[in-house]
Amino acid sequence: MKKVLTFALAAAMTLSLAACGAPSAGKPYKIGLLQYGQHASLDNCREGFLQGLEDAGLVEGTDYTVDYQNAGFDNAMDTQIAGKFSSEDVDMMVGVATPSAVACYTAAEEKNIPVIYVAVSDPAAAGLDSGNITGTSDALPVDAQLQLIRAMQPDAKTIGILYTTSEPNSVSTIAEYQEKAGSYGFTIDAVGVTTPAEVPQGADTLISHKVDCFSNLTDNNVVGVLPSILEKTSEAGIPVYGSEIEQVKIGCAASAGIDYVQLGKQTGAMAAKVIRGEATCDQIPFETIDSYSTYINSDVLDAMGISVPSDIAANAVEASAAA
Amino acid sequence: MLDLLVSTLIQGLIYALVSFGVYITYSILDFPDLSVDGSFPLGAAVTAVLLTRGCNPYLTLLAAILVGALAGLCTGVIHVKLHVRDLLSGIITMTALFSINLQIAGSNLTVGRSVDTIFTAGPTMALFGGLSLTNRKLVVALIIAVAVKLLLDAFFATKAGLLLRAVGDNAFLVTSLAKDKGNVKLAGLVISNALVALGGALVCHETRSFSATMGTGQVVFGLATVIIGVALFRRFSFVKGTTAVVVGSILYKLCIAVALDLGLPPNMMKLITAVLFLLVLVASGRKGEEIIHA
């Protein structure tokens, strides 16, 4: 009896797949949006992207529909969701963060579905710079960050950085830091970890090395457990410089960084062109963000006894928890 | 909608290689081998590097099998020769492989569209060029899964294969036959990890990418598929274990596809998948409480 039930269940699952298929004739533009996982930066990318579409005058429901999925930082899930988008004949795939962008691009190959990505640090290295694909890069403004740290801490010598050895974005950013640090009078102390669980130990290592400050990248593993780093550093009296506004909000001292909502909006504007048929993805080169902003968290800076130079304070955006 | 079924089938057939590997260690040898989480991305890492260097795509499969066999040998030696507990020897190999995989690949890698994979290379095109890419992937994945299944079935019927099964069922029998059960275990681990690495290689061909974290959860996947598959066909003794685990793998991917398609909030995905598994297991009357030998 139960055997029968099992097969009935399998059959029902198969049928439910068939039942969920929607005909696409005369329908609004179908967007499959695949986000690698959930943390504040990636959420901002997605929200910014949807905002960008609205800003371009497109209306959700009549002009386009969005099927939003996230892969929970699981690559096999990334593949399966992208495959589902392709089999549903979406009109466009949007990948947020590099692994999802790669998964979308691979799944889009056969039907040549246009792919738009948000927040891929190095599109060329990921092989996403040619073909029916475009998007925005979130390469960090390393020079601006080093300048900012120098202005805030004129006597600092060593910058500690935590990163995940398997994230190509982090590895290439570390290389850039090491190349440029010398010209601002810094040395870089980089500690690589492999999992989020190792991050607190990495932070302890850097603190014991007596670094003058931390600089934080957009490394997914590290950002995920950033609060635990900030707890340790604030106890040790070491300021942490973030790479985007959300990190400053939760307790980094300052950042010359990216506003991911802005990055998402910029990407949404590119996607709108493709949706309207004004251009195809291969005609639009990938973009980096137009402008970087300086964010400061006065509460943290005051607690650390760091005074903000007036020229920086004049242009900086306050991002303390209260603001 | 047929499309979605096809893409689910492709995933199920490709990942069936992992299920075969776990079936050999867990179900036949009674050896909980965790090295799978490392040997799976190992196969993908070697494949990604070779593909980007212009190596023949078919040869990458062979290379993956070889490095996977080495990984299995490593676990086997640690367990059999150094007398480390089975679970721990797998954990040691898996942990070491994380670094080794990164050392091999440099970092996460993508294989560009201009590079031929086993799904797009000349000989495949000559045979199945008339099919769409998706259908070609299905046919190639099917051929590989069926070929491996038949090879395994044939192997299990040989003297060596029977010894392998005996070690899991009744180790004393093996000793009384004047055979060294340690060496048999070693052989099983080698074969198992070679298959898992081949699975990793196929995933690399299919997704055109390698990521250091892609191995996370593969053991769990393998165990789930073996238990689902074997439980499902428990009363159908004519269905071989190898067939059962392929079905298990496809069912697992189907559960995910259904959960995805229900259109629930993305954060609920895993919960829905878990509920579907439970339904399948309860319905088959087997809750996965027993290790089932072949």
Image (cartoon, coloured by chain):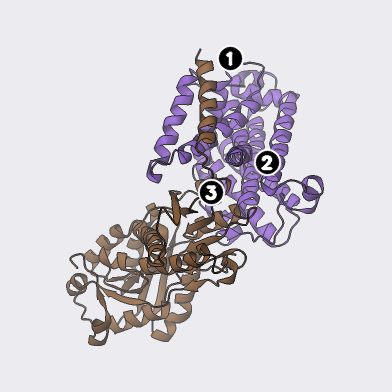
Chain colours: A brown, B purple
**Distance from Cα at disc 2 to Cα at disc 1:** 29 Å
Q: How far across and how far down the image is residue A130, in percent?
A: 61, 67
| Residue A153 visible in the snapshot | no
Specify the subunit that label 1 lies on: B
Q: Amino acid at mark 2?
A: Leu
Query: Residue placed at 50% from the left, 34% from the top?
Result: B255
Quadrant location of residue B22?
A: top right
Report the disc number at residue B138.
2
- Residue sitting farthest toward the top: A1
Query: Residue placed at 42% from the left, 31% from the top?
Result: B275
**Distance from Cα at disc 3 to Cα at disc 1:** 38 Å
SS under mark 2: helix
Crowd class of label 2 (few under 14; some 14 to 19; many from 20; radius 10 Å):
many
- Residue sitting farthest toward the front: A26
Marks 2 and 1 share the same chain = yes
Quadrant location of residue B262?
A: top left
Q: Quadrant of the C terminus of chain A?
A: bottom left
Quadrant location of residue A221?
A: bottom left
Q: How far across and how far down the image is residue A128, in percent?
A: 57, 65
Query: Residue placed at 35% from the left, 63% from the top?
Result: A205
SS under mark 3: helix
Q: Amino acid at mark 3?
A: Phe
Q: How far across and how far down the image is residue A119, in percent?
A: 45, 65
Report the disc number at residue B235.
1
Q: Amino acid at mark 1?
A: Arg
User: Which numbered mark, 2 or 3, is in the foreground of this view?
Assistant: 3
Specify the subunit that label 2 lies on: B
According to the image, label 3 marks what residue? A85
SS under mark 1: loop
